[in-house]
Image (cartoon, rainbow, N blue to C red):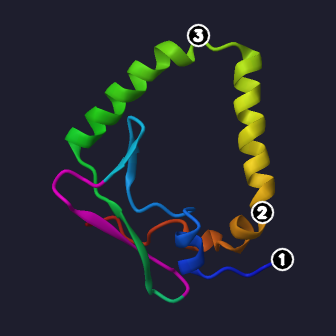
C-alpha cells in the first residue's frame, strides 16, 4: 500500500474544505470555519465551513428539490450509480486507507 501525506490527499481532490450544497462546493456565508485537528498531534490538518441557519436551510431546500427527480429514478439506474461509486472506492483504496480515521472528526465544536 502506498502511503499518502495530507497534501497529496488534498491535491488528489479527496479532501474538500467546503460544504456541498445544491451541486456546488461553498464556504459559509459569513466565512466562519471550524479547525480540524489531528487528535494524535493536535496539529491543524484542515478546516470546514461553520454553516449556520441560512446554509442549513439552503441545503434542506436543495435536498428537497433533488428528491423529486431522484425518487423517479429506477432501481437499475440507482444500481449503476452505486456500482460506479463502489468502483471509485476500489480504484482509490490506497488513498482512502492512508487517511487516518482518527483525523476525521474534530476535537472541538466551537468556531
Of labels 3 and 2, earlier in sequence is 3
Q: Quick one: label 1, few (<14), some, or many (20+) residues within 10 Å?
A: few
Q: Identify the disc placed on residue 93.
A: 2
Question: Residue 107's quadrant in the figure?
Answer: bottom left
What residue would you read off at disc 1? 1
Q: CB atoms at circles 3 and 2 under 8 Å apart?
A: no
| Along the viewing direction, whichever of 88 and 106 lies nearer the viewer | 88
- Residue 57 colored in magenta in the image: no
Q: Residue at x 81, y 54 (%)?
A: 90
| Along the viewing direction, whichever of 54 and 40 lies nearer the viewer | 54
Q: Quick one: label 2, few (<14), some, or many (20+) residues within 10 Å?
A: some
- Image position of 19 with respect to 93: above or below: above
Judged left or right of residue 36, residue 53 is: left
Give the SS element for disc 2: helix
- Image position of 106 with respect to 30: above or below: below
Of labels 2 and 1, earlier in sequence is 1
Which region of the structure is painted magenta?
A: 27-40
Q: Position of residue 93 (x, y in %)?
A: 77, 63
What residue would you read off at disc 3? 72
Label 3, label 1: how many angstroms apart (C-alpha)?
A: 41 Å
Amino acid at each position: 500500500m502506498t502511503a499518502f501525506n495530507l497534501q497529496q490527499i488534498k491535491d488528489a481532490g479527496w479532501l474538500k474544505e467546503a460544504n456541498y450544497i445544491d451541486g456546488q462546493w461553498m464556504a459559509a456565508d459569513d466565512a466562519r470555519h471550524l479547525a480540524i485537528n489531528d487528535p494524535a498531534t493536535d496539529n491543524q490538518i484542515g478546516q470546514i465551513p461553520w454553516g449556520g441557519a441560512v446554509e442549513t436551510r439552503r441545503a434542506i431546500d436543495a435536498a428537497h428539490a433533488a428528491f423529486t427527480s431522484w425518487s423517479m429514478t429506477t432501481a437499475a439506474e440507482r444500481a449503476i450509480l452505486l456500482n460506479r461509486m463502489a468502483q471509485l472506492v476500489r480504484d482509490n483504496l490506497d488513498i482512502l486507507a492512508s487517511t487516518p480515521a482518527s483525523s476525521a472528526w474534530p476535537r472541538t465544536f466551537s468556531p
